[in-house]
Image (spheres, rainbow, N blue to C red):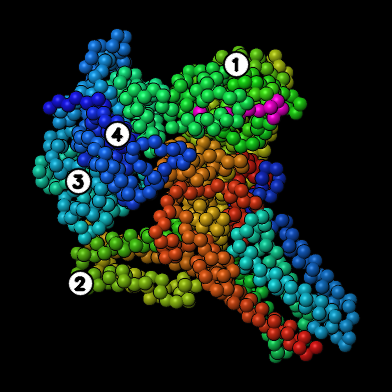
Amino acid sequence: MNDRVRIAIVGSGPAGLSAAARAAALGLSHLLIEKTDHLSDTIFKYQKGKHVMATPSQLVLRSDCDFEAGKRESILDRWNGQADAQAINIAYNAEVKAIVGTGDPIAGSIQKIVERKRDGTSETKEIQRFAPPYRLTLNDGREVIADAVVMAIGTQGNPNLMRVPGADLPHVQYQLDDPAEYNDEHIFVVGTGDAGIENALGLAADEAQGNVVTILNRSTEFASAKAANVKALMTAAEAGRLAIMTESTTAKVEPGFITLDSRDGEVKLKCDRIIARMGSAPPRAFVESCGIEFTSGDRLAFPKLSPVFESTAPGIFVIGALAGYPLIKHCMNQGYDVVEYINGNRDLKPADEPILAAKFAGLPEKKSVAEWLEYLRANVSILEGLSPLQMREFMLDSEVRAYRSGDLIFEKFDPGSSLFGIARGQALVEVASGVEIPIDQGSIFGEVGLISGRRRGATVRAGADSIMVEVSRTAALKLMSSNPPAKRAITRISTERQLLQMFGAGLTPADLADILDTAEIRTVKAGEAILTEGDIGNDIYVIRVGSMIVEKKIGGKNVFLSYLPAGSYVGEMALIAGGPRTATVKATVKSEVIRLNGDAFARLMAAKPALLERARRDMAARQDVNAFVESRKDSFSTVVDMYSETAKFLVDNGIGEATDVLLIDEHLCVGCDNCEKACADSHDGLSRLDREAGRTYAHLHVPTSCRHCEHPHCMADCPPNAIHRGPDGEVFIDDSCIGCGNCQRNCPYGVIRMDSVPPKKPGLLSWMFFGAGPGPGEPSKKWRYKNAESGVEKPKKAIKCDMCSGIEGGPACVRACPTGAAIRVAPEDFLTVARLGGEAR
Amino acid sequence: MATPAASPIRRARGEVLHDGFLRHAGFRWLKIATITCVLSIASYMLVDVTPHHNGGSWYGYTMGTIGALLILWLTLLGLRKRAMTRGRWSLKAWTSAHVYLGLSLIVIATLHTGFQLGWNVHTLAYALMMLVILSGLFGITVYASLPTALSNNRAEMTQVQMLDAVRAIDRQLHDAAQPLTHEQAALVRQSLEDDPFGGGLVSRLSGRYPRCATARAQAALRRWTGDTPDTGNDPLERVDALLERKQAMLARLRRHLKLKALLEIWLYIHVPATFALLAALTAHIVSVFFYW
């Protein structure tokens, strides 16, 4: 059968549904193609009763479908109802296999697809693009001809399928919605990632169900699963609740049986159901095969789009999460806009226009949003390569401000990770008191905070009446990943500035040109050494991101000498004094260093006596530390060992990437949990720390509580961009959290929890004298349930330590510790050899 | 390894990063309390009250007022601890002051009595105060000595994890006991149905549970396993190994609960006695003014 429509919409998520609803409202012939048997599969797969949020709240919704924050079920019900009422033409269980233009070949429009193989080689395929209309081939062989195609398939991808004979039988499934559905079955789970393990445990949890569950592992290791899941699986296997078959793969599937290739040869086993959880393939390959080009080869790159979301294949539009917009409201607005555009409406302003207009409202001249965007793009050098659509998106995450001459932009030691671009005017950087270095229009500043995540290194004022763009960390990272020239420019400037700042006044950018030409940025894995004791070499290393520890072998043992935060340099000893390296320098976390050529640096030192003097002073200080440790080693060997071991323990537990961490001295901790209670009572009744959990070494306990990492893992993937670094260096989550749980999954230290705010408690005195309420600390689940406001559904949001920002007196956990066991430290305070002096006395 | 109180960890700048409540701010409150005591004793010697020192003299009233106010302030620690108000206060400083000023009360209140004790409400107040102070002394002792043991014993496990571990062993025991004979299974069931922490306060504080069903079950099963070699797949040997593990985990949990109980038990005397003291103190003051 052949269908002919104006618009084919692929994917029925919020973006696709909204586009189809618009097409239906405009009376355009359309087809909404959905690969499952229901609308909006991503939201459908959310856990039952999940609260879905509607952010950003200032963005107006422009769609023929309604959407407001609420339960998963009510949102899906409403959309289903509206899809029926608006007579949207939907093809369910239809998966698009190919999209090809049926018109003439477009001259010169050839797409190169680079396919990287597992063995490291790559193959380039070329696709000639053809003009619309497009022919969409569906999995059932049906073909649809469409003038325009709207791709709204999201980023979820397709599950990897089993490729054995019989894999298409109905009892092979790729998802498990409710483990309680199956009883008295022989079930095989294929794949030992988290999903597979969780499914297997779910099926075997209740013995009354009588399932015989076996999980298959291709190898002997469980490398791709969380440690906690693996442990739970092992316990379950030990208890005989399920079986694990290692080094086994499926060979054949038949009704009622499965044949496995195992260590002991081929075995045929009874099998009623196979649940295959072998990961999923991102949709990129399919998208590329349609002629849509991506901005780069980066795994996180998005398709190249015009301001109206048109891809490099004319007539194919990409919207929604696939286009880089994970929030539901954005998706729905784009669906509306893109169909309006296809229908010939060229004057529609994007829904984010008012947000941008508000950003530009405070500037001295009156220009339209488009004019301002163009002005900034043309005047700030790093923005030059951006398209108007990218510019728009970029500005949504950024701020623009006007400063009068002499206005303070930021002060030394302010926290801040944003980057500033000068669109007009000049900035003055105070490198020493009274000494100011000007930075001119078009350039950038503030990049050190962006890269190292530490506090500002200098005070900056406006040198003339200026307009500055403040680029948030996320926007800057996005810019750098999507725009290689911008990345190179930022890297070179930041390296130059970092060197100027580290080695002090007296140096000018011109002096550094020689060094910068030979400078090389290197990524160092955690635990990898950049310098090894005894090696020959004279290069200087500057730590740009992350942190390092310095160790020296004394009496056959590695002794911890010092901790180097980002912004320090090493290697000067061998350069100045000659001879081999005197200590080993290792990365504590994944870090980046700048390697400076030793000879070039030596020439610079020869030309600049002040720099030589500076390096000699630093060297002398380090030699003092070495000598001190060596002298202590004989008289206090146990103390030195102890100190070294403790330092290693702390580094292993992520203190190396911390900026502020809660430690508990278990010589003093009486286990009263007043810290937890104080935390709960200072923050809406929810504690953000778990005192008892966590690692302990030599009675130094690292509780489960935020370390405020230099480069917070939690920030990596926050759809509403709700995680920020606050004025005291704290990492906090603001109210725009949508409760997606990404940060909780990304945190390697497990310090983020998802919970809703409990009901308000009666006051302390009424508890003390009349026993009203649950008393100090986090109320019990039971009390919360009993006292919950009926009919009001409170969303579960991510909560974590914010270092009690805004609370006078500082962190409540430390203030409320009756014995002085709880302390908060920065790693450079703690991991210093000076402690050795204190302990040894 | 340094002793608990003797290992202050210092910051690079020489500033004391952290020390316990006893050492707080270089023993500030110990110094203040000592000076107060010395001054009180000296003034007691120097002031001549005729016919002899007693609570009713001007000197006695002064000491009594100081003592009563001190008691009220010391009681407020309970409120301070629970009221998470803003501001630059430290509960550690409060505890430190509470400990040392509380101890100085021994001197102040004793001097207030002029050593005139008898069978009356006044002496009752004094006795209750001493009870509170003595229980507090016990508290200081356990706070200074037990945390290290608590930390060593738990070996990075939380209490919930320990309980979960016992439950996990119980589940495995339940499954492993299926092939056993009726008589043997009954022994395992005893262990499963037993409340391993029953036995009251004495057991909790001593950590000894003589009627532990797990220990009994294991001892009884050893009758069968004792003289048969372990061939590796005898269900009875498996049950025996599980019981052994359960015993070890129970021992750790019981030690944990014992230490926690010791860290808390004194508060069950300290706090109620404080309230009794406040009542007796009120009676003491009212009666003194009533019979002015």
Distance from label 3 to label 4 (Cα)? 47 Å
- SS label for mark 2: helix
Q: Which residue is mark 4?
A: A25
A638 left or right, relative to A257: right
Distance from label 1 to label 2 (Cα)? 84 Å
Classify mark 3: residues with Cα within 10 Å, few (<14), some (14-19) or many (20+). Answer: many
Q: Which residue is mark 2?
A: B182
Q: Are marks 4 and 1 in contact (CB under 8 Å)?
A: no
| Residue A401 among magenta residues | yes
Distance from label 4 to label 2 (Cα)? 75 Å
Q: Which residue is mark 3?
A: A188
Q: Are marks 2 and 3 in contact (CB under 8 Å)?
A: no
Q: Residue at x 48, y 39 (%)?
A: A58
Give above or below for B62 relative to A572: below
Quadrant location of residue A828?
Answer: top right
Q: Amino acid at mark 4?
A: Ala
Residue placed most toward the observer, A359 or A618: A359
- State which region is magenta: A395-407
Q: Which residue is mark 1?
A: A515
- Specify which label sits upstream in the sequence, 3 or 1: 3
Count of marks, rendered view? 4
Q: Chain of mark 4?
A: A
Classify mark 1: residues with Cα within 10 Å, few (<14), some (14-19) or many (20+). Answer: many
Distance from label 4 to label 1 (Cα)? 63 Å
